[in-house]
Amino acid sequence: MANSSEDLRVELHTFQTPDSKDTQPGAGLWVCAKRYTTPSSTRNTEGLTLLFTHCNGSHKEEWDLVISRLFALQTHKPESARIREAWSFDRQNHGDAAVLNAHALVKRGDTVSLYEWAHALRSFIDSPLLRGHHLVALGHSAGATAWMLTTFSPPPIPYTALFLIEPTITPQHIFERELAERQSYMDLVVQLTLNRKSEWKTKDAAYAYFKKRIPWSMWDDRAVRMFVEHGLHDAPDVRRGVTLKWTKEQEAASYPDTKPHHESAVQLAKISKAVPVHLIWGERVEFMCAYNQNAVE
């Protein structure tokens, strides 16, 4: 029986995006993932395997605190409701994956689309590694869209349930109706991203920088420290200190890619009749306005 006193085991995995006619540009890019288990959890073959994806401008470790807490709450649950294992994934141009793919990303010159990420994710969950698992997908913001795009593949839908946290899924008619406002806000986010500082002498200096600025100043301090610890690495030129693992240009180019979010809204209406889908919104309205939230509920 899993219990809160068990140590959480974390393993790093890497795999390459397989070739695909529809996502040819992403073929060969690396995806980095973390697998979380406890000594007893993997013996529970009836349990749930949780799959986590992050938002733009983040990395797979944004989920570390949540995953640790979920494992700690397992003690009194029936086996079918306990966690068998959990996985978190970097988008190919974020986190550790951005470091592995740095040269390939510079060579191709454009951003990694959500279709490419979804293709890699679907290939992973269809692999023998997760065969027979009861899968629950949990995605934050753009990560929610990525999971929704994986459901376009041939049926059946591979998930027992989906949890979409602050999803950026938006019906196209809503986006076009509010185009001026949405475009203005998107342009602002892109500009702020490109103008953001991306190099610091030390991680402590980077932490002090983020703590003073929105949105990081509104985060739990543990989340800010996790962002800095896993989102930064030594700059290629060691004299420059530390830098983000992904480039500002790659992150900024991800925001205007709206088509996947529109297509996911159509798909959400279809699959919600076949599998439970849970939408989770924060108390504070930030990136997604109330009319966006209402449109997908």
Image (tube, rainbow, N blue to C red):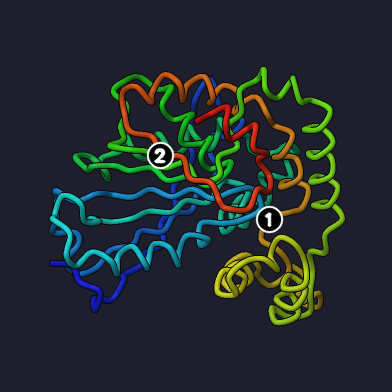
Check disc 2: other Cα within 10 Å, few if <14, some if 14-19, many if 20+: some
- Residue at 34%, 22% in the rendered image: 273
Amino acid of disc 1: Trp
Q: Nearer the viewer, residue 156 or 27?
A: 156
Left or right placement of residue 34 versus residue 46 in this view: right
Whether 23 is drawn above or below 239: the answer is above
Q: Is residue 215 left or right of residue 159?
A: right
In the rendering, at what x and y percent does residue 197 appear? 83, 64
The quarter of the picture where residue 22 lies is top right
Q: Earlier in the sequence, mark 2 or mark 1?
A: 1
Q: Please state which of residues 216 and 24 is positioned toward the viewer in this rendering.
A: 216
User: Which amino acid, mark 2?
Assistant: His
Residue position marked by numbered label 2 in the rendering: 278
Classify residue 179 as left or right of residue 285.
right
Which label lies toward us, 2 or 1?
Answer: 2
Rendered residue at 70%/82% (across/down): 204
Q: What residue sits 33% from the left and 55% below the top? A: 86
Q: Look at the picture and state if 215 lies above or below 3.
A: above
* Residue 262: quadrant of the picture: top right
Q: Which mark is residue 102?
A: none
Q: Quadrant of the N terminus?
A: bottom left
Q: Are marks 2 and 1 in contact (CB under 8 Å)?
A: no
Q: Is residue 85 visible?
A: yes
Secondary structure beneath label 2: strand
Q: Which mark is residue 246?
A: 1
Cα separation, mark 2 vs mark 1, equals 30 Å
Q: For numbered disc 1, what is the local secondary structure?
A: loop
| Residue 284 at x, y percent in the picture | 63, 53
Q: Is residue 135 above or below residue 194?
A: above
Q: Is residue 170 left or right of residue 74?
A: right
The residue lying toward the viewer, choosing from 133 and 32, is: 133
x and y, in percent, of residue 219 in the image: 62, 66
